[in-house]
Image (spheres, rainbow, N blue to C red):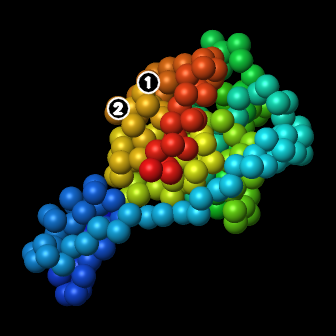
Amino acid sequence: YYPIIRSLEKRLFNRCKYVIGNSKAVVSQLKKEVSDQSKIKLIISGTNQFNLKNKSEIRKKIRNKLNISQDTVILIKVANLIEYKGHSFLINSLSKMIKTSNTKWKLLILGKDFGIKKDLQQQIDRNNLNKNIIFIDNVSNPRDLLFASDINILTSFQEGFSNSIIESMSAGLANIVTNVGGNIESVQDNINGFIINDFKTSELSDKISTLIHDGELLKKFSIESRKIFLE
């Protein structure tokens, strides 16, 4: 099935007047598929700039609504529940961390279910993570939930250019992302977050643990995310 789609895409691309990529990584891939490379154009995805004036007030309100204390570190993952988005990989990584973490944390998972939520819930149950992970459905605008959070997590196995990263940076969140697609065009390793280069649960677990236990580093990454977004 996949090779057939790839073949059709290639034919279609070469019949288009222009082919648009939303990240340098996507453009690089398109160059392998489009004969006339003058057709290829780069248009970076954008998002609205969040006004942070009332962030603290909104943060407190949302946390109270979710019954989450103000000193809890909140991770957030904004991605539809599709296998390649890496939810299972993240849950496995968190199951390793929970055994050594002495800091209160929660993970908010926002996204439409495309058939894997039941399996993810069973995985959460097996790893005794029910008290730590919350699914939130039908969110059209994640701004308030981003304001309530501290760390944006993107563990996809493939990406173009993630709007969720841009929105999280606008909200002033630190990021932990996998090295796929255009992720590293927004997140700078050890500047406004961590890049996960290998899909190893130990690496992801260690990076999450580092951030939730180091308040100063978390604050630094958060400030830099907003700064980079505004540049």
Where is residue 128? Give x, y as percent: 72, 27
Label 2 is placed on what type of residue?
Answer: Asp
Q: Within 10 Å of the Cα at label 2, are there few (<14), some (14-19), or many (20+) other Cα atoms? A: few
Residue 109 vs residue 24, the one in the foreground: 24
Residue 175 vs residue 127, the one in the foreground: 175
Q: Relative to 168, does residue 105 appear above or below in the rendering?
A: above
In percent of the image, x 34 and y 52: which residue is there? 181
User: Which secondary structure lies at badge 1?
Assistant: helix
Q: Relative to 113, does residue 78 appear above or below in the rendering?
A: above
User: Which secondary structure lies at badge 2?
Assistant: loop
- Asked whether the beta carbons under mark 2 and mark 1 sit within 8 Å of each other, the answer is yes
Where is residue 23? Give x, y as percent: 33, 59
Point out the image quarter for the N terminus: bottom left
Between the residue at mark 2 and the residue at mark 1, the CA separation in whole angstroms equals: 8 Å
Q: Relative to 41, does residue 123 appear above or below in the rendering?
A: above
Left or right of 43 in this view: 139: right
In percent of the image, x 46 and y 40: which residue is there? 177
Q: Which residue is label 2 attached to?
A: 198
**Do we see residue 201 in this rendering?**
no
- Which quadrant of the structure image shows residue 5? bottom left
Tag of residue 203: 1
Where is residue 168? Give x, y as percent: 58, 48
Label 1 is placed on what type of residue?
Answer: Glu
Q: Relative to 213, does residue 35 appear above or below in the rendering?
A: below
In percent of the image, x 57 and y 35: which residue is there? 223
